[in-house]
Amino acid sequence: MGKTIIQQARGHGSKTYRVRRQAYKYKLKYSNYIGEAKVAKLLNSGGHSAPLAKINYENGAFFIPAFKGMIEGQTIKIGTKEIKFGNIVQLKDVPVKTKVYCIESKPGDGGIFIKAGGVSAVMNRKIGEVPFILMPSKEEKAFNPNCRAVIGEIAGHGRQEKPFVKAGRKYHLMKTKNKLWPRTSAVKMNAIDHPFGSGRGKNPKSKVAKRNAPPGRKVGLIRPERTGRRKR
């Protein structure tokens, strides 16, 4: 009798493989408001790798990743040219070599890039009015000069230094973020559990799966540009 493999179970979306909505109830997106705002509270969220900050302003509140050194009751400014930790500034007004995070992809979207704990990007150079940001991946990316970013570095830099020691702790952390862990190699499974199962010869079958293949069949090479050994 056949068995539902783990890709099919995850694709089906049962409660076993569905993240808790409570973990992602905070939407990280700052407002288009211009003026002063206040850090109301620092929060812990299981779905995020950084501590979060609730920012109160005249028209309501929003959440952003907290920067290193942020304290409750602190005042930040939105839409001004003042370069200070926590301020939300347009990239055209950010000096070179300044650390930024939570960068907008297009003006007004509230911040898309750089939200993980302990990371930041650097304003690398400007050509005319076009700013070029050095991302944590060491790649340089050009942005619209009217895009905004938060000045500073995200808190939680040492989060990966402390070892988990026990597998149970790692399991519960990954479950909070809806990550599959531990990751079992396909060739180590039984033949009934995966198309690459049984591991005869430890050579996975070279399968070319269609892009619209259902969960469970979408294994191996997913719509590759080319297959086979590259000739030199």
Image (cartoon, rainbow, N blue to C red):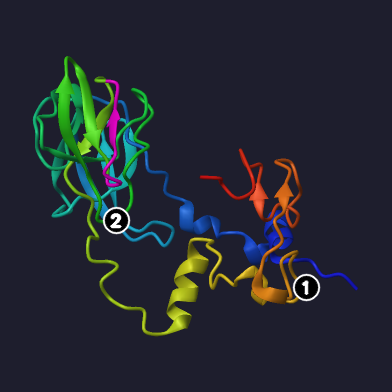
Residue 222 higher or lower than 78, as above or below: below
Q: Position of residue 73 (x, y in %)?
A: 15, 49
User: Is label 2 in a helix, a strand or a loop?
Assistant: loop
Q: Magenta residues: mostly which secondary structure? A: loop
Q: Would you name the residue on which mark 1 appears? A: 191
Q: Would you name the residue on which mark 2 appears? A: 117
Q: Residues within 10 Å of mark 2 (few under 14, many from 20)?
A: many
Q: Range of the magenta residues?
A: 136-144
Type of amino acid at the residue the image marks with label 2: Gly
Q: Indicate yes or no whether the magenta region holds residue 164.
A: no
Q: Position of residue 92 (x, y in %)?
A: 18, 22
Residue 39 visible in the shown view: yes
Question: Mark on residue 1?
Answer: none
Who's the residue at 66% across and 42% down the image?
Answer: 223
User: Is label 1 in a helix, a strand or a loop?
Assistant: loop
User: 220 and 54: which one is in front?
Assistant: 220
Q: Badges 1 and 2: C-beta atoms under 8 Å apart?
A: no
Who's the residue at 65% across and 50% down the image?
Answer: 221
Q: Position of residue 183 (x, y in %)?
A: 56, 70
Q: Is residue 169 left or right of residue 2?
A: left
Quadrant holding the N terminus: bottom right
Query: Outermost residue toward the top?
Result: 128
Residue 133 higher or lower than 230, as above or below: above
Residue 199 visible in the shown view: no
- In which image quadrant can residue 216 be found? bottom right
Query: Outermost residue toward the front?
Result: 232
Q: Indicate yes or no whether the magenta region holds residue 143.
A: yes
Type of amino acid at the residue the image marks with label 1: Ala
Who's the residue at 37% across and 37% down the image?
Answer: 112
Question: Mark 1, mark 2: which one is toward the viewer?
Answer: 1
